Amino acid sequence: MTREARPSKRSRAPEAERDNKSVDSPVKDEAATRKVSGHRFRQQRGAWVDVNYNSSMAMTGVRRDTEGYRALVADIPELGRIAEQLGGEIIVVVKGRAYRIR
């Protein structure tokens, strides 16, 4: 048997592991971020936070299933679509204003 025909003693697993640990790994990004209705969100302290959120922004907070929430969604339907797809607390930026949905 020639050298090229022999099975390799080296496992391919380390190469695969290296590929999965790369900075651009989609597996890692999917666990920490989601894209919904054109917005990108990252998981932060148990909440989904719009990557465009800045703590200096004015914020309006509402709770799901309240009159205030229904009125806000009627005015900005995009918020309702996002809230339907993401559970828990959400901070989303629409037209330069932050909204916290709980």
Image: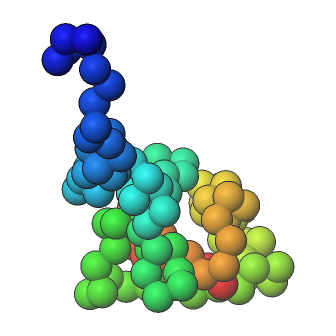
Position above or below: 16 against 76? above
What x and y, as percent, mark residue 78? 60, 55
Locate residue 22 relative to residue 100 in the image: left or right: left
Position above or below: 1 against 70? above
Q: Residue at x 82, y 79 (%)?
A: 65
Locate residue 101 relative to residue 93 in the image: left or right: right
Position above or below: 77 against 3? below
Locate residue 33 relative to residue 36 in the image: left or right: left
Q: Quadrant of residue 62?
A: bottom right
Q: Nearer the viewer, residue 99 or 26?
A: 26
Furthest residue toward left: 3
Q: Residue at x 26, y 87 (%)?
A: 56
Q: Residue at x 43, y 81 (%)?
A: 44
Q: Does residue 55 show up?
A: yes
Q: Residue at x 48, y 62 (%)?
A: 31
What x and y, as percent, mark residue 18? 25, 51
Q: Quarter of the image containing the N terminus? A: top left
Q: Quadrant of residue 10?
A: top left
Q: Does residue 25 show up?
A: no
Q: Nearer the viewer, residue 50 or 19?
A: 19
